[in-house]
Amino acid sequence: MAKAPGRKKTKSRNPGRVRAALTQLRMHPLAALRGLLLRAALFVVAVILLLVLLFAFVNPPTTQTMWSEGRRLGQPVRQSWVPLEEIAPVMARSAVAAEDANFCLHWGFDVTAIRAAISEGSRRGGSTITQQVVKNVFLWQERSWLRKALEAAITPAVEAIWSKKRILEVYLNIAEMDEGVFGVGAASARYFGVEPAGLGATQSARLAAVLPSPRTRSAGKPSSGLRRRAAQIADGAATIRADGRADCFQ
């Protein structure tokens, strides 16, 4: 007698295992995207660190601010690079007194100034000269959380690799001091017709006084408010020289 065919055995499926497999399949693209973003972020960090190292010795050829200002004006901006040794010491002291009096005492962030800015509701936010250099050389001007995060990450690297003299030298050569005029080399010629080494105390204080708003203030034709601000800066420059807060760059 022929044997009756038996039922074909089928493997029982585990619904949990199937769902896990499907979930894993769906997650692969996300994992790949995360990996790609991570590699891109590491590449950007590597490039920035290389530029930080490079610009410790090589002068930045331009900045995003110079490029955008030249494009806005429809003509090249004015800038001539001047070594710190060829800039009047009183100009360096005036810039520090105006923008970051504790420049020699901090490592990129002035916590006291930041707290004061927050309590007073200041829009400038207590940025140090180092932070301004990082923003101008490596980043962009528009405010955003991304820019502030990158600025906070790059600032300690600049402080660790560059000397204080180098930070101040770069700042004095890239800061906008008139519409389309960048750095003390171009500004001293534009306003006073002198070389940066020949700047006096009053001239230096006036140049430093225009730094927060170079497109609305003039060191050559100072308003009464700018004259008062320049007098305060001149006093501050003398103070930091006397109390040692200029020792790191002079």
Image (spheres, helix red, strand yellow):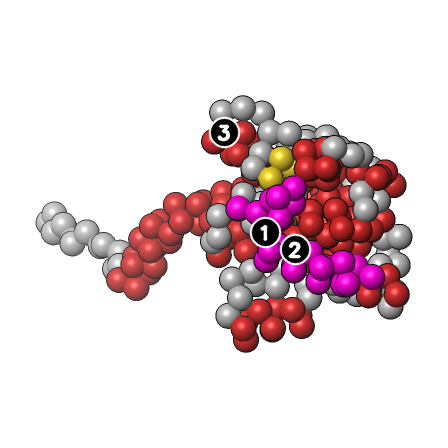
Disc 2 marks which residue?
227
Q: Which of pointers 1 and 3 lies earlier in the amino acid sequence?
A: 3
Query: Mark 2: which secondary structure?
Result: helix
First to last magenta residue range = 216-238
Assess disc 2: are there few (<14), some (14-19) or many (≥20) residues with their C-alpha within 10 Å of its C-alpha: some
Which residue occupies 48% across, 52% down? 143
Assess disc 3: are there few (<14), some (14-19) or many (≥20) residues with their C-alpha within 10 Å of its C-alpha: few
Image: 73 above or below 38: above
Image: 162 above or below 61: below
Quadrant position of residue 224: bottom right
Disc 3 marks which residue?
73
Quadrant position of residue 126: bottom right
Closer to us: 26 or 52: 52
| Residue 239, numbered label | none
Disc 1 marks which residue?
223
Residue type at the position of mark 3: Leu
Q: Are marks 1 and 2 in contact (CB under 8 Å)?
A: yes
Query: Where does the image place residue 115, in percent across and percent down from the top left?
Result: 60, 73
Query: Mark 1: which secondary structure?
Result: loop
